[in-house]
Image: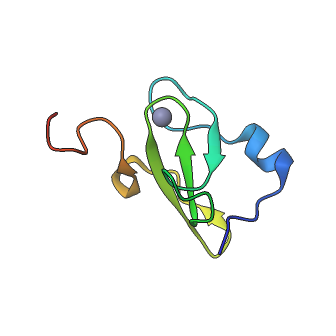
Amino acid sequence: MAVDLEPQLLEVLACPCPQHARLRPGLGDDPQADYLTCTSCGRAFPVRDGIPVLLLEEAVGGPGASGEG
Ligand SMILES: [Zn+2]
């Protein structure tokens, strides 16, 4: 199921990373995933019951996710 957020909500949401970058719907190469992905650091945040969980400890991917960092 795709993330179904109000466009206005996406406008105001920001990643909790230092860049506070914008988020885009989807996860990596799967735009239908229930995630929001940071356009800067690449972390993906789960969307649960329509509510984005913008917590770094809940994020997947991003810096060091490959085990190199
Ligand atoms: Zn970020």
Question: Where's residue 51, x and y in %?
Answer: 64, 65
48 displayed left or right of 8: left
User: Going 49% across and 37% down the picture, which residue do you hit?
Assistant: 16
22 displayed left or right of 39: right
Q: Quadrant of the C terminus?
A: top left
Image color mode: rainbow
Which is more toward the observer, 37 or 18? 37
37 displayed left or right of 59: right
Q: Taking 22 as reference, is 37 above or below it?
A: below
Question: Where's residue 60, x and y in %?
Answer: 37, 54
User: Going 45% across and 25% down the picture, which residue do you hit?
Assistant: 18
Q: Taking 15 as reference, is 34 above or below it?
A: below
48 displayed left or right of 41: right
Q: Quadrant of the N terminus?
A: bottom right
Quarter holding residue 39: top right
Which is more toward the observer, 57 or 1? 1
Q: How many marks?
A: 0
Most extreme residue toward the top, as rendered? 19
Question: Where's residue 12, x and y in %?
Answer: 75, 39
Q: Taking 66 as reference, is 58 above or below it?
A: below
Most extreme residue toward the left, as rendered? 68
Question: Where's residue 8, x and y in %?
Answer: 85, 46
